[in-house]
Image: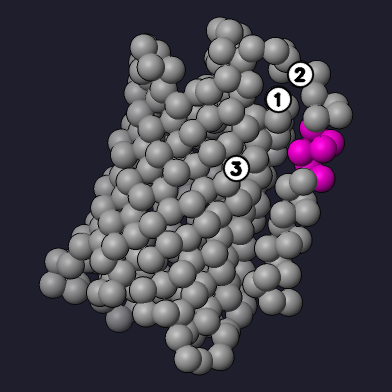
């Protein structure tokens, strides 16, 4: 099945989910969602430092600097053992179309993560997460290595502007391959609550590739989403990037759609 038809499937799923949620939404108060109870519900539901069992599905199209393109359909399952400990698995299906060549498709690199909330204080939290990217993809559809990629991020509440700040750092290290992966990633996300249970999430990301003469790349993504019910949220996320002529994982532009369903 082509990338276009897969994206049509995902869009159909999102529309059906939205319609079902609109018809059955009695779990979150209606009306002006700038009121405190709804704002608190939105914050709790979307706070990545407050773990909840959930399933997610996203489709992302990436247009690359070399003229090629890539598509990713990524189901994710996260199981929360508690509010402070959760395990996650992602199993991506990838389409890769190099410029001037035929497309390849198949299983991508499976990602495993263990999330641990190390700190929780008044208005802040700190999460530490060992993560492993397994070399499960066919040639040209993944990194072609097993990569240890630990994550640390904080959640800082900013009630004055109805927002939450997320400083984020990740390191990618090849532990079973050609030993040619050494990348640092720094992000600074800002989640802002809007009326009617809408939200925005602005996420600039800065990459340093230590194996490619410390070359750098930058992406900027803007997510616009809505909490449709207590259990269901949907989003769309466009983005742009620079530096991808030297760093193949940094796109020229992308667009992502997805939904998450909380299982509690």
Query: Are the two marked residues, 1 and 3, in contact with CB atoms closer than 8 angstroms?
Result: no
Tag nearer the camera, 1 or 3: 3
Q: 160 left or right of 93?
A: left
* Residue at the image point whose x is 36% and y is 12% from the top: 160
- Residue shown at 69% from the left, 38% from the top: 261
Display colour scheme: one colour
List the residue tagged with mark 3.
235
Mark 2 burial class by Cα count in 10 Å: few <14, some 14-19, many 20+: few
Q: Are marks 2 and 1 in contact (CB under 8 Å)?
A: yes
Q: Nearer the viewer, residue 258 or 121?
A: 258
Q: Secondary structure at mark 3?
A: strand
Residue closest to the far bottom: 101
In the picture of the structure, the residue carrying the numbered disc 2 is: 27
* Gap in angstroms between the C-alphas marked 3 and 2: 20 Å
**Which disc is residue 140 wearing?**
none
Q: Earlier in the sequence, mark 2 or mark 1?
A: 2
| Mark 1 → mark 3, Cα distance in angstroms | 15 Å
Tag 1, which secondary structure? loop
- Residue identifier under label 1: 230
Stretch of the chain drawn in magenta: 16-21
State the residue at coordinates (85%, 27%).
24
Secondary structure found at label 2: loop
């Amino acid at each position: 099945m082509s990338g276009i038809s897969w994206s049509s499937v995902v869009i159909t799923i999102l529309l059906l989910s939205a319609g079902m949620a609109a018809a059955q939404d009695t779990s979150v108060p209606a009306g002006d969602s700038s009121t405190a109870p709804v704002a608190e519900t939105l914050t709790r539901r979307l706070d990545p430092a407050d773990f909840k069992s959930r399933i997610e599905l996203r489709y992302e199209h990436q247009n690359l600097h070399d003229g090629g393109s890539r598509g990713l359909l990524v189901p994710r399952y996260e199981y929360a053992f508690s509010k402070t400990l959760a395990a996650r698995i992602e199993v991506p299906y990838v389409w890769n179309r190099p410029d001037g060549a035929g497309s390849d498709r198949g299983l991508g690199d499976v990602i495993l993560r263990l999330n641990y909330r190390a700190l929780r204080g008044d208005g802040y939290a700190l999460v530490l997460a060992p993560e492993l990217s397994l070399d499960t993809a066919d040639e040209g559809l993944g990194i072609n290595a097993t990569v240890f990629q630990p994550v640390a991020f904080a959640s800082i509440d900013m009630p004055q502007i109805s927002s939450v700040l997320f400083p984020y750092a990740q390191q990618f290290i090849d532990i079973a391959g050609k030993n040619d992966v050494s990348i640092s990633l720094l992000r600074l996300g800002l989640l802002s609550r809007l009326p009617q249970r809408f939200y925005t999430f602005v996420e600039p990301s800065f990459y340093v590739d230590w194996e490619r003469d410390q070359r750098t790349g930058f992406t900027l993504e803007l997510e616009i989403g809505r909490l449709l019910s207590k259990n269901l949220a949907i989003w769309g996320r466009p983005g742009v990037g620079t530096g991808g002529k030297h760093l193949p994982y940094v796109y020229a532009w992308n667009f992502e759609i997805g939904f998450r369903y909380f299982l509690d």
